[in-house]
Image (spheres, rainbow, N blue to C red):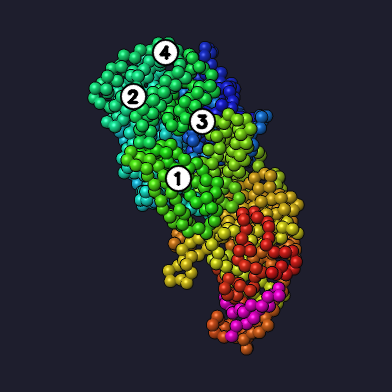
Amino acid sequence: MLLLLGLCLGLPLCAGSLGEAWPRDDTSEQVGFRGPRQVRLLQRLKTKPLMTEFSVKSTIISRYAFTTVSCRMLNRASEDQEIEFQMQVPAAAFITNFTMLIGDKVYQGEIREREKKTGDKVKERRNKTSEDDGEKGTETFRASVVIPSKDKAAFLLSYEELLQRRLGKYEHVISVRPQQLVGRLTVEVNVLERSGVTSLEVLRLQHSRQKGSVRGEGDSELPPSTVINQNDTFAKIIFKPSVVQQAKIAQNGILGDFIVRYDVNREQSIGDIQVLNGYFVHYFAPKDLPPLPKNVVFVLDSSASMVGTKLRQTKDALFTILHDLRPQDHFNIIGFSNRIKVWKDHLVSVTPDNVRDGKVYIHHMSPSGGTDINGALQRAIRLLTDYVAQDDVGDRSVSLVIFLTDGKPTVGETHTLRILNNTREAARGQICIFTIGIGNDVDFKLLEKLSLENCGLTRHVLEEDDAGSQLVGFYDEIRTPLLSDIRIDYPPAAVERVTRTLFPNYFNGSEIVIAGKLAHRTVERLHVEVTASNSKKFVVLKADVPVEPPEAGNDVAGSARPEGGGAGDPNHVQRLWSYLSTKELLSAWLHSSDERDKERLRQKAQALAVASRFLTPVTSMHLKRSGLQTDKPEDAQSMSAATGPEPVMQSLRGVSPQPGPALKKPYNPRIKVSKTSVDGDPHFVVDFPLSNLTVCFNIDGQPGDILRLVSDHADSGVTVNGELIGAPAPPGGHKKQRTYFRTITILANKPERSYLEITPSRVILDGGDRLVLPCNRSAVVGRRGLEVSVSANANVTVTIQGTIAFVVLIHLYKKPAPYQRDHLGFYISSSRGLSSSCHGLLGQFLSRDATLTREPAGLSEGPGRPPLPRAGDGPETVLKVRGHQVPVVRKQRRIYNGEEQVDCWFARSNAAGLLDGEYRDYLAAHPFDSETAFGLGPSGGL
């Protein structure tokens, strides 16, 4: 089997066109081929691979988008054929996973550190922006595979991105270009915004720029068959066109871009701060401020290559922009080729006469000569620097260069690094450079670095685009600066690992986003201080912002949830922090000129990208044959769902360490196991079979706390931790909040180290080869003395070396009440392999005995005993266990998902006196933390 994969990213790491990567034998399309008419007819009738399903599912939570693309294909031909899957991915997105199912074989992508050698891995290649290599602002992912006759293939691709706010709207773009009509085509977008969704709109499909490939849909506002459901904080959009509707849009299956735009409600001037599980994100987008004056120099390439339509459209756009300047602005115009031609020797104010004269000057520009990019930039920066110095307006205005070219430097200084250094030294961080590159011959890499290093933005306009309208649209984004020299501060002792906090400008309709970690999860308020300048004064905003986490119940039912990304079930806020931090490290790495610093930045970016599973210039994706055994892809109920960046294969039926052996039956959820468990809110139950006693207690933890349940790392090598999530308390209850276990993590250190992470939606097994099992499909997998059995939507059984067994019950709610959350229960089925030194909230009671030193008169433990007294009905009994004595009362508890009721002796006050130590002694630092606050002796007491 031949696997040929490529990822087309606009990165300077690989050369060559994509066409070179996949040679084909398409003789039927060779120019000049002549043959008998019957041969040509057979070639035209050759059966092409059939795409049976194409689905895209996006979940946007607080501007952070998780997208999963699923595609199924069938080789109908009587011979082997090459099948290609391709998807245009937003340029700002990080690919997090790629999985292929070929027949009954599964190949999973694994993000690793980038190596120099090449192999069977996804490769990054520079995007040549040819007609079929992706549209503006996208990068094309391609995967090709040769599959046998009559066989099937399925592809799953996941990526993540932070949506950028431009002109007052967030825009989420999904490429719908399956290249053929598809029987089942679905696009689903879920938007969840805590502060409220406003101005939601779905644009008509933005068609491909390939000539003749698409027939328009007229002025129709919505794409056909689009359904929108929306309330204050949530919106669900489904696009599900039939084959007939697809054909009306485009016979070749290139439907175009499906675009969702929206904004959110904003109330606080200090911005919106959201906190989840120790991470925070701060969205800052002030409004209703007076605009800052602009000092702007327009620099226009008038070299010979601009002749014709490009120069005419650019002139028309500048006419429009000059009319849009405000009376308090100042401007100048430079035309450059091999000569630098300046309209005025200084910036002039915006008056009707000056605007008219500027338009006349632009009108008379004629294309000729070469391209002196360095000279034009130096002249523009000098004009701005002189004006600001003479008029003393630096603190009350914003200085900009808007630079447009269609080529590479050919005159004067032509060395890229020297141009960048000259520009950076001249601008000194006081002047922002915004660049527009036109066409396929432009040195877009140079323009991008010029903007990034000088607090600007860049745009790439393709040859077939309307350069004029693109330039006007780009200017609209920066036409209204509201603040300059923005600094956002948080108390140093309260936060850590915060992303960028200094920003040169804030333009109306955009947004500043900062993310970081809270030093203390229990903090209730976060002090925020914003300092900036606007047209009137120096602005200082201060506020103590509540940092209550968003309600966990706001998850989107059935959507791609933001899970995965490492141990501990990271949330969307943590993923957003990882995304921003990786972007900033990569930017610093690319622009560093010091070799030692550059290597340090590369290593930091690489480590974070690998930990977050981001495909970047410093990481690579390797395809590995998985041990999964699957049904045929077309037999699966669905392949479109995914939990965040994880590869979710809903066709999964079972797993085996190697192909061949029969699978064991998944665990039957009704089989009774030991009563020793923690479940619900959370309620702990400990069974002492030798004494015929059962003890129970509650722990009132805090959301985000990670509790040590079983700690036996030093002996058996087993550690079990559980992370809590919060929920409101039921009305009329005595508690202020409820807590449940959302994640159970198990570390098995013998015979080889394996990590297991369980949530209500999926199981991740990582011990070198990473496996991801959805909880809605039954499966069994075994490796390295560890066996995991999933019973669909019921439980997960974990067996370690045949002597230790845990059962994790899955509690799911179709229509949860406000105080209910999908959660887990943890039961110890067999503890034979755990040592006598085992500790933890449950582990400390294993292999121990307990006695009652006093009990109410008439109470017995035998059959036929009288009704049990309840709490408050009689004198308390004293329980002795592990050297502790604690008063207890009788209670009843339901376990096994409510199927069985047990009588137990209840220890009040968070089991004070029953447990070794205090609550904080059972808090783990991270989900796989194997340390313990207690000694290894049998009592472990304090």
To which residue does mark 4 refer? 339
Outermost residue, top side: 369
- Magenta stretch encompasses residue 179: no
Q: Secondary structure at mark 1?
A: strand
Question: Residue tagged by mark 1?
Answer: 488
In the picture, measured across the screen, residue 460 lies left or right of residue 143, that is: left
What kind of secondary structure does the magenta stretch mostly adopt? Answer: strand
Q: Nearer the viewer, mark 3 or mark 2?
A: 2
User: The N terminus is located in which quarter?
Assistant: top right
Indicate whether residue 890 is drawn in magenta: yes
Residue 736 in picture, x, y percent from top left: 47, 67
Of the residues under marks 1 and 3, which one precedes in the sequence? 3
- Earlier sequence position, callout 1 versus callout 4: 4
Report how far apart the C-alphas of labels 4 and 3 lie in the structure. 39 Å
Q: CA distance from mark 1 to mark 2?
A: 32 Å
Cα separation between marks 3 and 2 = 43 Å
Region of the chain picked out in magenta, as a range: 875-892
Instruction: Write the residue at 68% across / 78% down.
Output: 880
Residue 243 horizontal side relative to residue 830, left or right: left
Residue denoted by label 3: 140
Residue type beneath disc 2: Leu
Residue 844 x, y percent position in the rendering? 69, 67
Instruction: Confirm or deny contact between disc 1 and disc 3 (CB under 8 A).
Output: no
Type of amino acid under label 3: Thr
The residue nearer to you, when weighing 105 against 128, is 128
Pointer 3 or 2: first along the chain: 3
